[in-house]
Amino acid sequence: MTSSNASSGVLSFTSSSNSSSLSSQWSYDVFLSFQGENTRNNFTGHLYRALHQNGINTYIDNEELRRGEKISPTLLKAIEESKISIVVFSENYASSAWCLDELIKILECKGSKQQKVLPVFYKVEPSTVRHQINSFKEALAKHEENFKDDAKVQRWKTALKQAADLSGFHLKINEEQSKLKAY
C-alpha cells in the first residue's frame, strides 16, 4: 500500500481504489502524529501540504499541545477513523505526554482496526527511539518524576519500541528533507 519515491522524497500512497473514496469506517486517509514545536512549521507542515495537494484526506491537529492535559476525545476519534497513521519521531517527540498517548492509541488501532502505521524518523536514529536513549531517555525520566505512574511510563516505552520496530522512513540529521529514505 505504501511506497517511497527516494528521488523526490515524496511519500506516495496507492491502492486499488481512489483515496477520496473511503470506506464508511474511515473519515481520514492519514492521521499525522508529531511533536509540534519540532516539526509543525517545517517537515510536518510540508508533508501535510504534499498529502493534501495529492488529494489525501489528512488529519493534522492545529491546536497547540498543552503539557499535562489529557488527549482530547476529538483527537482519539480522528485516530480511530484514520486508515493510516504517520508518526513523525523527532528529537523532542517523547517530551510530550500527549504525543505518547497518541502513539498508544495509534498502536491499539493498528491491532484492532488493522490501521497502517508508518514511522518517520526525523533527524533521530530509529535505534534512539527503539532503545529510548539520549533525548528520549531524558524525557521519559522527567515523565516518571512528574506523573509518578510507572505503569503509564512503561506503556509509553513499550509503544516507542513497537513503533520503532516498524518499517518506515528515515531522514538523517544533516540530510536534505527531500532525501527522505525508506527504512
Image (cartoon, rainbow, N blue to C red):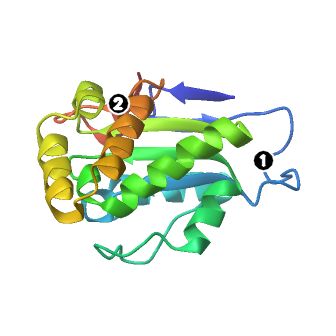
Amino acid carrying label 2: it is His
Closest to the observer, 127 or 21? 127
Between discs 2 and 1, the one toward the N terminus: 1
From this view, report whether residue 31 is shown above or below residue 37.
above
| Residue for point 42% across, 72% down | 70
> Considering the image in quadrants, where does the C terminus appear?
top left
From this view, report whether residue 77 is shown above or below residue 177.
below
Q: Residues within 10 Å of mark 1 (few under 14, many from 20)?
A: some
| Residue for point 38% across, 57% down | 99
| Residue for point 44% across, 36% down | 119
Instruction: Give the labeled residue for mark 1.
Output: 19
Amino acid carrying label 1: it is Ser
> Considering the image in quadrants, where does the N terminus appear?
top right
Percent coordinates x, y for residue 45 in the rendering: 41, 60
Q: How many marks?
A: 2
Percent coordinates x, y for residue 76 in the rendering: 59, 64
Q: Residues within 10 Å of mark 2 (few under 14, many from 20)?
A: many
Instruction: Give the labeled residue for mark 2.
Output: 170
For residue 180, the mark is: none
| Residue for point 85% across, 32% down | 16
What separation in Å lies between label 2 and label 1 (alpha carbons)? 25 Å
Q: Secondary structure at mark 2?
A: strand
* Label 2–label 1 contact, CB within 8 A: no
Quarter where residue 66 is shown: bottom left
**Does residue 165 appear to the left or right of 118 in the view shown?**
left
Closest to the observer, 154 or 67? 154
Quarter where residue 84 is shown: top right
From this view, report whether residue 182 is shown above or below residue 61.
above
Percent coordinates x, y for residue 120 in the rendering: 40, 38
Percent coordinates x, y for residue 72 in the rendering: 52, 74
Q: Secondary structure at mark 1?
A: loop
**Does residue 116 appear to the left or right of 150 in the view shown?**
right
